Amino acid sequence: FMNTLKHKRAVSKVNKPARVNDSITEKEVRGLFELWNSALATGDSRVVASRYSKNPVLLPTVKDDPRTDYDSVKDYFDTF
């Protein structure tokens, strides 16, 4: 139970929706990176995977296979 509660709290802190727009400012890019980096700092692959869109394309640096859904992104960060 505590793990689930901890996960929900971590997700709520770092999983603010990204804004989809035709252009993005450098400040917005930095903000999105900070959200992703904060998710990574939790050490919880579920939190990191939740930062990706519903249709992600993660081209990993450690493994050769592209990750194109939540489960495969989570799996990548399970072993990262």
Image: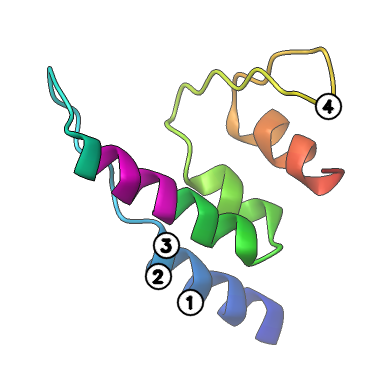
- Label 2 belongs to which residue? 13
Residue 50 appears in view: yes
Q: Position of residue 69 (x, y in %)?
A: 59, 25
Q: Mark 1 falls on what kind of element?
A: helix
| Separation of marks 4 and 1 at Cα, in angstroms | 29 Å
Q: Seen in the image, is 49 located left or right of residue 20? A: right
Front of the two marks 4 and 2: 4
- Label 3 belongs to which residue? 14
Residue 9 numbered mark, or none: 1
**What's the residue at 40%, 68% (across, down)?**
12
Q: Mark 3 falls on what kind of element?
A: helix
Which sits earlier in the primary sequence, circle 4 or circle 2?
A: 2
Q: Amino acid at mark 1?
A: Arg
Q: In this view of the protein, which residue sits in the foreground, 31 or 42?
A: 31
Span shown in magenta = 28-34
| Separation of marks 4 and 2 at Cα, in angstroms | 27 Å
**Magenta-drawn stretch, dominant element (helix, strand or loop):** helix
| Separation of marks 2 and 1 at Cα, in angstroms | 6 Å
